[in-house]
Amino acid sequence: MSKKVLIITYYWFPSGGAGVQRWLKFTKYLRDFGWEPIIYTPENPEFPSIDESFEKDLPEGLEVLKTPIWEPYNVYRTLTNKKKSEPINAAFISENKKQSWKDKLSIWIRGNFLIPDPRRFWIKPSVKYLTNYLEHNPVDAIITTGPPHSMHLIGLGLKQRFPTLPWVADFRDPWTNIDFYKELNLTWLADKIHHRLEKKVVRNADSMVTVSSGWKADFEKMNPKRIELISNGYDESDVQQGKVVLDEKFSISHIGTLNASRNPQTVWKVLSEICAENIEFKNDLQIQLVGKVDYSVLEAIQNCELNDRLIKINYLSHSEAIAKQQSSQLLLLLINQSPNANGILTGKFYEYLASKRPILAIGPTDGDAAKVLRDAGAGVMVDFSDAVKTKEAILSFYASYKTHSLTVGTDSVERFSRRSLTGELATLLNSL
């Protein structure tokens, strides 16, 4: 008989974007390892995008519990003159050149009063609802996944009521070490509260999980009872899409959100320089940006006179995005220029690997992403401001493109398959 695990997550189908994929895929495969997932998620969440293509991943007969959530986003929309139908960007993405005083005020309120995040008003009602549910429907373990980190505070509340029930806190991203933490403009008191709540979650969970070695090392300083590394990955059923026809142009593609801290200024300058030196390269070049893009990125591309080489696509479904990765000549992986850069390993990175296209990565050459890239033999990592090596890498990739030999051997990526990673999760749950 299967054991039961209650998974508390804000992002769930039909949400699009990176936030939903990790636990949707775990849920897809958990039954194969003797665990029956039960999902708890908001009835009326604020999703940055919708992706119906994820419906194929939902296990048949999955129990999904939903309760209403109140979020202050309509107040925010009123304050910033946004339409009610306009989605709120999850990351710090600005599509306008200057932040208004209203935007700045909203960010300050978010950081200092909505602690840990705008979903805080769902914590108490959820603890009450789930306490009643668990008293009548016992489970064998609870998992919370954040951000938003309010999900972990629901887990903390349930741990206090059910102290013998194993609780796993999954950190897809850090809390106080996240790349935009400083942009919240916190008072010393708010900063102290954020750190206190984070430590309370880390020290009370029976096990933490995070996605990279660097972040694991950071969390270990807070003395968790136990911490495990279970990386992000790719789903084999997503990447097996039949015959791939490569782009005719020398396409350099970035798939996903592109915020200011990922803006690869050096790449744009180098591409502009090569275009000025080599008209054939300029005619062959095609820059593809798929997803939300910060104004600073588009401004940098314009300043480098690359606008006529740019194709911008606001959103693709997950299946369409994977097809775009597989047809691109070269994939651009960008690590945030932030204090936690060494530990950044996004889910998109593993799908890049599985696409079996060469990767030009910009980020710390001694970070976790650089190590995985080297081990897989899938591309090259260049430091943020290293123009010489960036140019060398691009010209090398271009030379291979011209001789129809731009290929890559991705070794041992199978260990990052979603099914394999779900086996690691099941092993952890069994041990608890």
Image: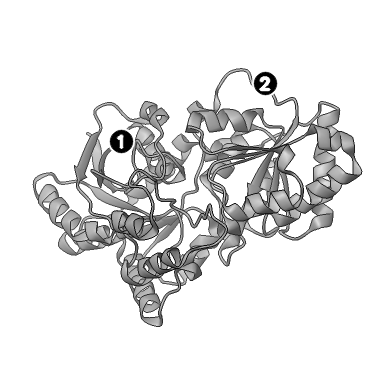
Kindly identify which residue carries mark 2: 245
Q: In this image, 382 relative to 39: left or right?
A: right
Name above or below for residue 219 compared with residue 413.
Answer: below
Residue found at the far top of this picture: 243
Which residue does the numbered mark 1 point to in the structure image? 34
Amino acid type, label 2: Val
Residue 399, located in which quarter of the rendered image? top right
User: Would you say 346 lies left or right of 419 here?
Assistant: right
- Please give the name of the residue rendered at 64% of the width and 49% of the height, measured from the top-left corner: 298
Along the viewing direction, whichever of 84 and 361 lies nearer the viewer: 84
Q: Amino acid at mark 1?
A: Gly
Question: Judging from the image, what secondary structure is the residue with disc 2 in?
Answer: loop
Q: Position of residue 116 (x, y in %)?
A: 34, 65
- Tell me which residue sits at (49%, 26%) in the image: 237
**Which residue is at 74% across, 50% downward?**
268
Asked if the residue at tag 1 contacts the one at tag 2, i.e. Cβ–Cβ closer than 8 Å, the answer is: no
> Marks 2 and 1, how far apart in space?
40 Å
Q: Give the answer, above or below, for where 136 lies relative to 200.
A: above
